[in-house]
Every structure is written in C-alpha cells, then in structure tokens.
Image (tube, grey):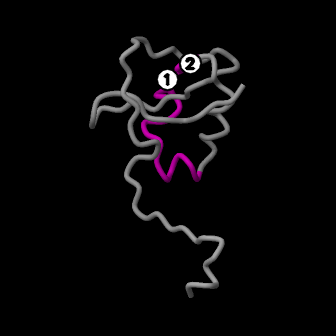
C-alpha cells in the first residue's frame, strides 16, 4: 500500500497525517508534532511508515479535509534540472 505523509486541517492548524490509497488517514501526532526538516532528517520517518500497518495510530475523521503544504516551515528549496550544464 502506498503511503504519503501530509498535513491536514485548517490553515495554521494542520495535523501531521499519513494518507493511504484506501482512504484512511492515520494521525501522526503521537510520532511527531510536525512534518518538517527535523522529522525528515530523523528516525521518525521510519516510525511513521510502520505505525499505520500495525494499527497504532488513531484515524482522523471527517470528509471535509483540507490538505496543507506537505512540509512545514520549508526554509530553502533547491533544484537542479537535468539541463543544468547548458545553463551554467
């Protein structure tokens, strides 16, 4: 099953969650307060991937869910295109 970490909720009050292909939305709040650089750099990503399969996370309810930015407080975003050498 494919999983995606995301932030769900009203602006400024997003909750970290995992969306699954089957429509479930487990709440990651018990693993991390936020999906941010510290979360992505640490061991929490592995815990977030395995916890839904073990049924350890409560499900977020409701059908009107706003999906926010997937990563909070993104400081820098750098990209290098495949044609970088042509433009350097």
Going 68% across and 30% down the picture, which residue do you hit? 2
Label 1 neighbour load within 10 Å: few <14, some 14-19, many 20+: many
Going 47% across and 63% down the picture, which residue do you hit? 77
Horizontal side of residue 71 vs 23, given as left or right? left
Which percent across, then down, holds residue 38? 50, 51
Which quadrant of the structure image shows residue 4?
top right
Label 2 neighbour load within 10 Å: few <14, some 14-19, many 20+: some
User: Which residue is nearer to you in this view: 51 or 68?
Assistant: 68
**Mark sitting on residue 27:** 1
User: Which residue is nearer to you in this view: 72 or 65?
Assistant: 65
Going 51% across and 15% down the picture, which residue do you hit? 58
Which quadrant of the structure image shows residue 81?
bottom right
N-terminal of the pair, mark 1 or mark 2, is 1
Which percent across, then down, holds residue 34? 43, 39
Q: Vertical placement of 10 versus 80: above or below?
A: above
**Mark sitting on residue 61:** none
Residue that label 2 marks: 57
The N terminus lies in quadrant = top right
Q: How many marks?
A: 2
Helix, strand or loop under label 1 = loop
Horizontal side of residue 15 vs 10, given as left or right? right
**Over which residues does the magenta segment extend?**
23-41
Helix, strand or loop under label 2 = loop
Horizontal side of residue 67 vs 81, given as left or right? left
Which percent across, then down, holds residue 32? 49, 36
Mark 1 to mark 2: distance in Å?
6 Å
User: Which residue is nearer to you in this view: 51 or 18?
Assistant: 18
Q: Vertical placement of 15 versus 83: above or below?
A: above
Contact? badges 1 and 2 (CB < 8 Å): yes
Magenta segment includes 36: yes
Residue sitting farthest toward the right: 1
């Amino acid at each position: 099953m494919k999983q995606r970490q995301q932030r769900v909720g009203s602006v400024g009050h997003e909750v970290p969650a995992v969306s699954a292909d089957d429509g479930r939305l487990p709440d990651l709040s018990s693993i991390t307060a936020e999906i941010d650089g510290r979360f992505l750099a640490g061991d929490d990503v592995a815990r977030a991937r395995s916890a839904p399969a073990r049924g350890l996370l409560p499900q977020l309810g409701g059908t009107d869910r706003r999906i926010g930015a997937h990563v909070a407080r993104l400081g820098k975003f750098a990209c290098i295109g495949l044609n970088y050498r042509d433009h350097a």
